[in-house]
Amino acid sequence: MRKQGFLKGSAILIATVAVTKAVGLVYKIPLTSMLGGTGMATYSGAFAVYAPLLAAVVSGISASTARLTAESCAFGRYANLRRIRRVSCAVYCAEGALASILSALLCVPLAERFLGGRSSAAALLALAPLPLLAALLSSLRGYCEGMSNMLPTAVSEIAETLIRALFGIAGAYAVLAYSDSSFSETHSCFGQYFSTADEARTYALPFAAAAAILAGSAATGIAALGTALSLKLKGDGVTAEQLDSDRLTDSTALIAKRLFAFSLPVAAAAVITTLSGMIDLITVSSGLKKAIAAGLAVRVPIAAERLPEFMYGSYTGLALTVTGIIPTFTAMFGKSSLPALTGSVSAGDSRSLALHIRRLLRITAVIAFPAGLTVSVLPRETLSFLFAGRTDEISCTVVPLAVLSIAGIFTAFSLPCLSALQTLGCRLAPVLLMLGAAAVKLTLNLILIPVPALGLTGAALSALAAQAATAIPACILLARRTSSKLPLSTVFAPLLPAALCAAAARLCADLLPRILPLTTGGRAVFMLSCTAGGGIYLLALRCGRVRG
């Protein structure tokens, strides 16, 4: 069978994340430029509305399928592998189909309740096929990951991201082009008449967001079909001799029961995680209305009644997009470590288990600290580099991004730790941790956002507190669960080099425009500053002998 170890599997997934995140940013930049803060509010809001349902259906599939597969692999039960794959696809696709039907039926009332009107229902309807398609794709990925083969996940994620980006941009552009053309010819857009082109384009923004979302659903379906065909044509690496060596299989009912037993806690934790987006959807705009009424000064040329929605869209479309990059990388460590952790648990090898946990936390720290601190000291430069031209949106999110970048460090630790805890059989603890974090976020959002001196920064501070309340206990619990003595140097050794990295980047960003006649603008300064900071970081790591 085609297997990769922890480091090789991690390298494959990290490379995949690097590609998909780069493509995702390339996608988000023109999409944000086309939709602006108002359109991104619909785009982000649609995902926030359906995220709990999607998480409940999809989140535990990959991990539970991978765990059962890894167990059968460890014990040489090759025939059982095939049955696990068939049962996983069948039960999870049935679950996904029910969720897709429910999503389609609820799109209009949910749009009216959470997204400001029926025009946003198209965005929710475009998400309706996603639970079924994502369930199939996650089941197939989990099967391959459980066999320590990360390549199918890597290839399908890259293909999915590329298709989403190409068709998403094309779809949104086509809708807006149609809107402009329709207004110039008839002063109408989607059956409505308008006096100005600005009003027509604003009305078309939810439909443009829906086109981009529909492209994402289609991309997931194409990736699922491609992965299924690949397994059919190339096989999974199990030979006929291996199948003949062990024909004993578990019953369909037992496999389904175990799949749900493993996936339900993961799904519950994921649902609670998605509550963060729902909490922001419900509380940010309403809190900003109170803050503006109390004297919050926002210097952007947006009508007062549209300002909260615009700021919410800017926050989710710009600040949260940037902050989510690094945790996505570190989450891959939790995924790639799953087969190794499962094998150690099955073999009762506590020494190997502790080694894997220390390695997981050390690599996470090496990546998370410099990235989070550097973005925190270069928030405006980062946003201007990625979203040049959206000056109004950037002005709303500079300070929130500086805070969120620190929160991103905690998130980077919490995701792999929670994944490892679930793999080790701690089913309740991750759920309780995430539930507590959601309560912290909701409480602080309600308290801080309406404060005129804070506004969106209050949302960022509440996110920081919530992530800290998750990551710190998760790391401690993981160490105790594995009886692993984790010296502080395991996690905090990269912190000083990371601080030097951030300081060097900030210093270069301040000095370079004064000493060099850079005619290419702020982007060149940003790239040179990050390069200088990265060089200092690598040098400090080598001097301190901190390695991932």
Image (cartoon, grey):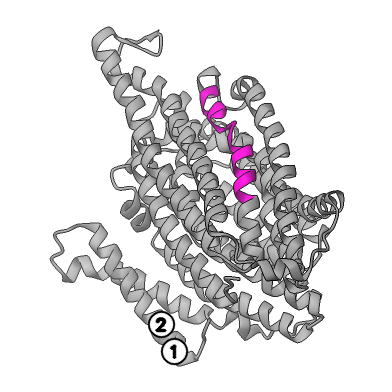
Compared with 460, 508 (above or below) is below
Residue 226 pos. (x, y %): 50, 48
Q: Which residue is mark 1?
A: 542
Residue 74 pos. (x, y %): 74, 73
Residue 434 in which image quadrant: bottom right
The region drawn magenta spans 121-138
Q: Residue at x 76, y 71 (%)?
A: 245
Q: Secondary structure at mark 1?
A: helix
Please say whether residue 49 is visible from this viewpoint: yes
Of residues 283 and 372, the one nearer the viewer is 372
Image marks 1 and 2: residues in contact by CB distance under 8 Å = yes
Q: Would residue 124 be counted in the magenta stretch? A: yes
Binning the other alpha carbons within 10 Å of mark 2 as few (below 14), some (14 to 19) or many (20 upward) gives some
> Gap between marks 1 and 2, in whole Å?
6 Å
Circle number at residue 538: 2
Query: From the viewer's perspective, is 178 left or right of 437?
Result: left
Q: Would residue 125 be counted in the magenta stretch? A: yes
Of residues 81 and 163, the one nearer the viewer is 81
Q: Residue at x 68, y 86 (%)?
A: 487
Compared with 223, 196 (above or below) is above
User: Which amino acid does the dot numbered 1 rest on?
Assistant: Arg
User: Which amino acid does the dot numbered 2 rest on?
Assistant: Leu
Magenta highlight: main SS: helix
Query: From the viewer's perspective, is 208 left or right of 470?
Result: left
Query: From the viewer's perspective, is 278 left or right of 519?
Result: right
Compared with 36, 500 (above or below) is below
